[in-house]
Image: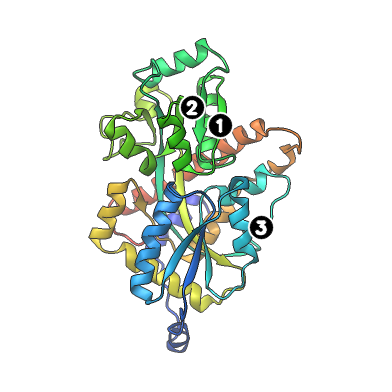
């Protein structure tokens, strides 16, 4: 029997990378020029935000620029495929989100294989989703919104960061849990999705907390419920879905760092150690938490095991080239997003919910 999600992440705090002195000296020659970090979604979303935060710190510590390049499109496949084809020299990295492990089961053909084409570096952080509506929507809480949606089947729509993204799957999981019929409107990232709801073009948005919280605080959107196991410090007055409805519905978004397959292990190790160094100080942890992210910083082997487990198993046969994949999205939602939440709860249990542990 393979390792469980709980086992993988619970062991993370005890793992130590210990390269030989010779390898450490070799790795110190890297990087000698700027490093590209591909973000496969549009600017403004949670993966973009975390990638930029970590890129800035990597730049400061390693002495060369780590710069973000947004390559959105095809549900993230454009950017991920570009990273997969890059040379394995450590100078092209990928900030991988949920679509990295979801797309192989959502699309009949994709330009990469998460396990074959990439080396895991670290699962860096995670964040929950929030369900929010435009202020004009006549629903002051999620129960009223569910009733509104049921009264007008198919007439309400919700925006997400794109087809096959964790936000899309979270929206489909919401529909499944409460039996509502809503139209999905995909965008090229969390930022554009939120902009559409701010402008009233889509009445509802399923947003990662870091993207949605500032607008909810300002009253530009009305946050109805957190899709998490506990309330957020950023939006303390917004109930969890379980509190509001009695139905436990939690959906996290994650950001990890991967490199093209064949990248030297010395470079992988150096990048992981640097990420662990980045999340260790209390001030950086507080910065992440203030933005709505929980630090993780797993080891490469733990992240690789996480990728294997989070790859939705046995669902690729459900895909049909001409279908909108609604059934597959629902299946992925129930098998993938809930497991991400369980994995992150395992981290919280192991660390005592204390930020700063390099898990």
Q: Which residue is mark 2?
A: 202
**Residue closest to the far left:** 283
| Tag 3 secondary structure | loop
| Tag 1 secondary structure | strand
- The numbered mark at residue 146 is none
Distance between the Cα atoms at labels 1 and 2? 8 Å
Q: Position of residue 185 (x, y in %)?
A: 56, 31
Report whether 351 appears left or right of 202: left
Whether residue 55 can be seen here: yes
Distance between the Cα atoms at labels 3 and 2? 34 Å
**Looking at the image, residue 309 lies above or below residue 11:** above
Mark 1 Cα shell of 10 Å, populated few (<14), some (14-19), many (≥20):
some
| Tag 2 secondary structure | loop
Earlier in the chain: of badge 3 and badge 1, it is 3
Q: Position of residue 276 (x, y in %)?
A: 36, 66
Task: Tell me where residue 135 sits by quadrant.
Answer: top left
Q: Which residue is mark 1?
A: 185
Q: Which residue is mark 3?
A: 113
Mark 2 Cα shell of 10 Å, populated few (<14), some (14-19), many (≥20):
many
Q: Residue at coordinates 27% horizontally, 54% vertically from top-left?
A: 287
């Amino acid at each position: 029997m393979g390792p469980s999600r709980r086992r993988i992440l619970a062991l993370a705090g005890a793992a130590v990378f210990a390269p030989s002195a010779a390898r450490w000296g070799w790795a110190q020659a890297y990087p000698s020029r700027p490093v590209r970090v591909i973000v496969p979604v549009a600017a403004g979303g949670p993966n973009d935000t975390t990638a930029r935060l970590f890129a800035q710190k990597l730049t400061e510590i390693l002495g060369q620029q780590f710069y973000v390049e947004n390559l959105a499109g095809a549900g993230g496949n454009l950017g991920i495929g570009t990273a997969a084809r890059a040379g394995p020299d450590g100078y092209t990295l990928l900030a991988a989100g949920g679509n990295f492990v979801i797309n192989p089961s959502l699309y009949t053909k994709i330009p990469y294989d998460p396990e074959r084409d990439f080396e895991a570096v670290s699962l860096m952080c995670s964040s929950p989703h929030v369900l929010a509506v435009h202020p004009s929507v006549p629903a002051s809480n999620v129960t009223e919104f569910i009733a509104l949606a049921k009264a007008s089947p198919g007439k309400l729509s919700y925006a997400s960061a794109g087809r096959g993204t964790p936000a899309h799957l979270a929206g489909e999981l919401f529909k499944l849990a409460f039996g509502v019929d809503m139209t999905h409107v995909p965008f090229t990232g969390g930022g554009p999705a939120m902009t559409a709801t701010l402008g009233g073009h889509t009445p509802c948005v399923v947003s990662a907390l870091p993207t949605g919280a500032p607008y909810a605080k300002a009253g530009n959107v009305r946050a109805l419920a957190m899709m998490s196991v506990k309330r957020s410090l950023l939006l303390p007055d917004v109930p969890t879905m379980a509190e509001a409805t009695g139905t436990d519905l939690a959906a996290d978004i994650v950001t990890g760092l991967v490199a093209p397959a064949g990248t030297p292990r010395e470079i992988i190790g150096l990048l992981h150690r640097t990420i662990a160094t980045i999340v260790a100080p209390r001030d950086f942890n507080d910065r992440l938490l203030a933005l709505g992210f929980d630090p993780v910083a797993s080891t490469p082997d733990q992240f690789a095991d996480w990728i294997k487990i989070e790859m939705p198993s046995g669902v690729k046969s459900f895909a049909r080239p001409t279908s909108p994949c609604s059934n597959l999205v629902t299946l992925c939602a129930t098998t993938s997003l809930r497991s991400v939440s369980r994995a992150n709860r395992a981290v919280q249990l192991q660390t005592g919910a204390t930020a700063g542990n390099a898990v």
